[in-house]
Image: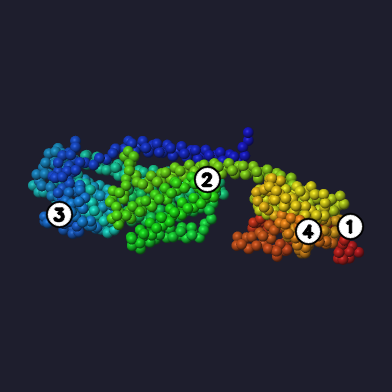
Amino acid sequence: MKMNGRAVKQLQLRLMIRSLAVLCSCVLFTLSCLAQASPVATPAPAQATAPALSGLHAVFQLDGPWRFSIGDDPGWADPAFDDSIWLSVNASQPLVDQGISAYSGYAWYRLRLTPQQLDDFGRLTAGAAPVLLVKGNSIGQLAVYINGIEAGHTQGMTDHPSMYQSLPVTVALTRTDATAPIVIAIRTWAGSDVTVRRGLLDRVELGPPTDIASRVQTVSVQRWNESAASALLLAFLFFCVAGLGVALYIGQRNHSEYVWLAILCLSVAAEGAADAAFGLALMPLPVYQIVSIFAGHIFMAVTIEFVLRFSAGKPHRFVRITQICILLVPFVHFIQIPQVYQALSVTAEIVFCSLVCVLLFRAWRGGQGDAGVMLIPFFLAATANSIDTVLGYALAQHWLPERIASPRFHLGPVYFGTGTIAYSVFLASLLAVILYRFIRVSQLEQRSNAEIAAARSVQALLIPTQLPSTRNFVLESAYLPINGVGGDFFQVLPLKDDSLLLVVGDVSGKGLQAAMNSSTLVGALRNELSHDPATVLEHLNHVLIGAVSSPGALPELDSAPCFATCLCARIYPDGTLIIANAGHLGPYRDGRELDLLPGLPLGVIADSQYEETTYQLNHGDRLVFLSDGVVEAANSEGELFGFERTQQVSNESARYIAQTAQRFGQTDDITVVSIYIAARTARRDKNELSQLR
């Protein structure tokens, strides 16, 4: 069994789709195994008083009491500074629960370790020099001072501080004087737009270098599981689906929704990659906010476009205005008025969710089952960012507590939020529907191609590729359908009296339906016994009217009412031309259009009467019949080929006229039939007679 090129291409695409599915499954399985194998970070138990031994290792958690003060002064790092008037706090408890109001900006923590405490640490750690582990809270930045000298800081704690996710800081406690205490001072900072309620110091531990290194590794694994694993996995899966969208578009170039699917998935993948980069302290908060804001709003605008293409909807003005407004909202972020941006962002997401659901619902009600299947997953995707945005807005307005406004879930050691759940469900549903749609469309296209091939073979039998050769007339034709098969038709029938019957017509519409309609008319023409042009047109009009008013009589005409313009001409060897017109363009005689009596197109009114016009042609005259595809050809600027250009080329060969119009910009089927009067019995004009004498 042989397969054509298209079938091979479809098979290759299906194999590629299955390969991508297998690849995604393998990646999911591998990442799941790695996640289960990763050690779970277990925070050390909190201590309320002086440092004490914790667990099996000599690691102490220094919860306090710490001295705390809001503000900033370089002198507060000095070990001789008197901090007795500062507030006493415990680092393991939120500051607001200890009577301290929420603040923003700088704050300091101070703790004094006495020589006796340091000696106790040394004995418990077998004399090894202890190492201090300082872990910040979220995006808080830290600088650690030991006896007034800076010993370490997070990457954002510089002369011009910037907010990153705070990574642990390790500092070696080296004693230069065994009788002197060690004063630990920690300078903390968060941006002015951050309200600190819990405190920026999360945990301080002291222990041997090996144990502290193990704690740092545990914290790193915990950070990966909490801040990066789910985001990276989701970004990778969306990136794979973006590649799948490109592959589907290659297989079905006339379905642009696959291109917008790829862009949609890339925007989600970019946002997921930004989440992971920020969670791993590879990206500062201002850059992350800009990337996340733009990626989220691009996702919304692209999703609307994808839904339009997917549901074959028309881009109404309201939809375009909504897309433009959604893309402009991120620029409001740079105005530095958070309340205005948050209000606009929430409004844009509510409008986006509503618009997507309305478009899909209308398409589903219009008979598109795919749109109905996509309604629920698209609603989840549309509300994924909206949920986080609305909850964040409610938290900023102090309408909800933090634990409710920022819900977190976990699967084993991997943590994720509500957005991850919604996007995962959306991705799975999207992938299933898109693959089902691709397979269904492929089957429909194969069936359509088979039907077009059948129609083309029928049309090849009914529309002559080679014109009859006679001693009285020289004929030439050109037929250029715009979609492989078309609605134009023509027939040239030699008659017993050496005359020629010529019929040229154009059925309304394009493609397969128009081709079948034109084939029906040609079949009716061949069964017509009369050869009078007016009678022929009346018979074709009856065929078209009867087919439309009596469904089932001609199944190929049952889909919709149609009409056709038509010219019927009979040319005798002596040059006599009898012609009747049914709304078609008049023929050109040596560069000039013939004036014909008007007539209604076929299929408009039953029992229409058509009048004949008679002309006398001369020996050597050229008569050119053409369809409106020549006159209505249009270039990229929308300029029509027009009657003037048609008249200029009307004395050329049929192929030249058709190709000239096609190069100008074909918009419809093009038909040109040229007849040269070569009969000796034809009348000769005065110039020809004078040359013969």
Q: Gap in Å between the C-alphas at discs 2 and 1?
A: 68 Å
Question: How many neighbours does mark 4 have within 10 angstroms: few (below 14), some (14-19), or many (20 or more)?
Answer: some
Q: Earlier in the sequence, mark 3 or mark 4?
A: 3
Q: Quadrant of the C terminus?
A: bottom right
Dot 3: what SS?
Answer: strand
Mark 4 — residue?
A: 610
Dot 1: what SS?
Answer: loop
215, above or below 294, in the image: above
Residue 216 image-quadrant placement: top left
- Colour scheme: rainbow
Q: Earlier in the sequence, mark 1 or mark 4?
A: 4
The picture places residue 615, in percent across and down from the top left corner, at 83, 62
Query: What's under tag 3, amino acid-wise?
Result: Leu
Mark 1 — residue?
A: 681
Question: How many neighbours does mark 3 have within 10 angstroms: few (below 14), some (14-19), or many (20 or more)?
Answer: some
Q: Gap in Å between the C-alphas at discs 1 and 4?
A: 29 Å
Label 3 or label 4, whichever lies nearer to me, is: 4
